[in-house]
């Protein structure tokens, strides 16, 4: 009877041990499922972050192109200013001169021809001025866009240094736990 009781006690202990192991296994399975779910979420977030970071080269190219175009507009404006000043001087000399000569052939100009030449030079000056003002406007608006691009690029750099690295470490930690 003692042996039977001892055997019964041993079986109960084994049964309790197996039940405890089963509960731990179920808990571990539940934890594994939760970790896998967290890992999938981390992967999805990393993928979204990566997609945002992949825009960086395009933004940098846009920024460089815009800066080049702005520099070109400013350089052209320096040239246009010289051309417009030269036109202004020529117009002034033609208006004051009595016996003006043709700038092409060197022949004397009649008052009508001189007036036509002045009008032609003034029209050319207006075209140059329009181009100058358009370049100024472009330089101003491009400055705003360049600043916006700088802000976006700075945000992406910060994102890469902080959030992307944090999520990478989180995903690595979750992978180790599985």
Image (cartoon, grey):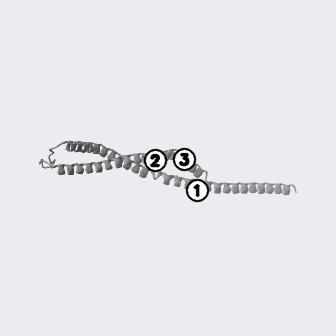
Q: Nearer the viewer, mark 2 or mark 3?
A: 2
Please identify the quarter of the rendering in which residue 34 is found: bottom right
Q: Is residue 119 left or right of residue 108?
A: right
Q: What residue is at 42 percent from the left and 46 percent from the top?
A: 146
The residue tagged 3 is 163
User: Label 2 to label 1, Cα distance in Å?
Assistant: 33 Å
Q: Is residue 47 left or right of residue 127?
A: right
User: Label 1 to label 3, Cα distance in Å?
Assistant: 16 Å
Nearest the viewer among 176 and 34 is 34
Residue 143 drawn at (x, y percent): 41, 45
Question: Up-down: is 106 above or below 40?
Answer: above
Nearest the viewer among 56 and 173 is 56
Nearest the viewer among 136 and 178 is 136
Neighbour tally class for label 1: few under 14, some 14-19, many 20 plus, Cα within 10 Å? some
Neighbour tally class for label 3: few under 14, some 14-19, many 20 plus, Cα within 10 Å? some
Please identify the quarter of the rendering in which residue 93 is found: top left
Nearest the viewer among 46 and 121 is 121
| Mark 1 residue element | helix
Sequence-first disc among 2 and 3:
2
Quadrant that contains the N terminus: bottom right
The residue tagged 1 is 40
| Mark 2 residue element | helix
Q: Nearer the viewer, mark 1 or mark 3?
A: 3
Disc number for residue 148: 2
Q: Nearer the viewer, mark 2 or mark 1?
A: 2
Q: What residue is at 74 percent from the left and 56 percent from the top?
A: 18
């Amino acid at each position: 009877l003692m042996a039977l009781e001892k055997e019964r006690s041993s079986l109960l202990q084994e049964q309790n041990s197996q039940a405890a192991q089963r509960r731990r296994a179920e808990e571990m399975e539940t934890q594994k499922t939760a970790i896998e779910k967290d890992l999938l979420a981390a992967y999805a977030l990393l993928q979204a972050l990566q997609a945002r970071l992949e825009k960086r080269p395009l933004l940098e190219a846009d920024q460089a192109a815009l800066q080049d175009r702005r520099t070109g507009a400013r350089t052209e404006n320096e040239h246009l200013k010289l051309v417009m000043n030269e036109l202004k001087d020529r117009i002034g000399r033609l208006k004051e001169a009595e016996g003006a000569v043709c700038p092409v052939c060197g022949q004397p100009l009649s008052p009508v021809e001189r007036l036509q030449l002045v009008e032609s030079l003034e029209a050319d000056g207006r075209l140059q001025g329009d181009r100058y003002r358009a370049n100024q406007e472009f330089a101003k608006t491009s400055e705003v866009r360049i600043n916006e691009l700088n802000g976006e690029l700075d945000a992406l750099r910060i994102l890469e240094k902080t959030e992307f690295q944090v999520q990478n470490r989180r995903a690595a930690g979750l992978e180790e736990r599985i």
